[in-house]
Amino acid sequence: MIEKTSISERRACRLVGLSRTVMRYTPEPKVEDAVLTQRMSELAAERRRFGYRRLHALLRREGVEANHKRIHRLYQAAGLAVRRRRKRHGVAVDREPLLLPSGPNQIWSMDFVFDALASGRRIKCLTIVDDFTKRRSMSRWIRASAVSTSPVYSIARRCWGDLVLGAERCAREPI
C-alpha cells in the first residue's frame, strides 16, 4: 500500500489497523530450534515408526525443555512424518504347486459354507468336492459352535480312510 500510494507508513498502518512494530518485525531463527530440529531428524531416522509425540518423550528424557506444540511445529517444518508400512508381497515359504487330477477320486477340496436359520442359529456346512468332476462328494451340516479343526479331520477320515488332509486341500496317498 505504501509503494503504490504516497501515504506515510504511520497512516497506512492506522488505516489497516496494524501496529507499526508488527509491520517492521522480522523473525530471527533461533539457534536452539536448529539444534532441536537436527536432533529430531536423527531420532526420526533411527526410529522411523515414531511420531512427534514419542519423539517429544525421547527428547524430554534427554533433558530438552520444549513443549509438545513447539515439537510439533518443528516436526512439521522439518518435513518429518511417520513412514507408512509397506505391504508384504509374496510369502517367504515356497509353496508346492497344486496337483492336477487326471481322473476322478484323486484330489478333493474341502471348505466351510456358513449360514443362519430363521431362528438365528448359525450353522456351517463342511463341503468336500472332487476336483476332477467338480461333483460334491460329501456335505455335512454341523452346528457352528461345535466346529474346530479336529472334528473336520475326523469327519473326513471317517468317510475316506486313506486321505491325507492339508489346510484346505486333500489328496489320496501315493501308492
Image (tube, grey):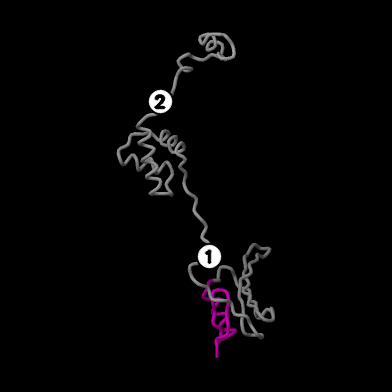
Left or right of residue 98: residue 30: left
Q: Residue at x 46, y 38 (%)?
A: 76
Q: Which mark is residue 90?
A: 1
Q: Quadrant of residue 71?
A: top left
In the rendered image, residue 161 lying in the magenta stretch gets the answer yes
Q: Residue at x 59, y 14 (%)?
A: 4
x and y, in percent, of residue 110 in the image: 61, 75
| Residue type, mark 2 in image | Glu
- Is 108 rendered above or below residue 8? below
The residue labelled by disc 2 is 28
For image coordinates 45% across by 42% down, the residue present is 80
Spatial separation of the CA atoms under disc 1 and disc 2: 52 Å
Query: Is residue 50 depicted above or below 166 in this figure?
Result: above
Magenta-tinted stretch: 148-175
In this rendering, the label closer to the viewer, 1 or 2: 2
Query: Which image quarter: residue 43?
Result: top left
Q: Residues within 10 Å of mark 1 (few under 14, many from 20)?
A: few
- Residue at (47%, 17%) from the top-left corner? 22
Dot 2: what SS?
loop
Against 69, is 138 above or below?
A: below
Mark 2 Cα shell of 10 Å, populated few (<14), some (14-19), many (≥20): few
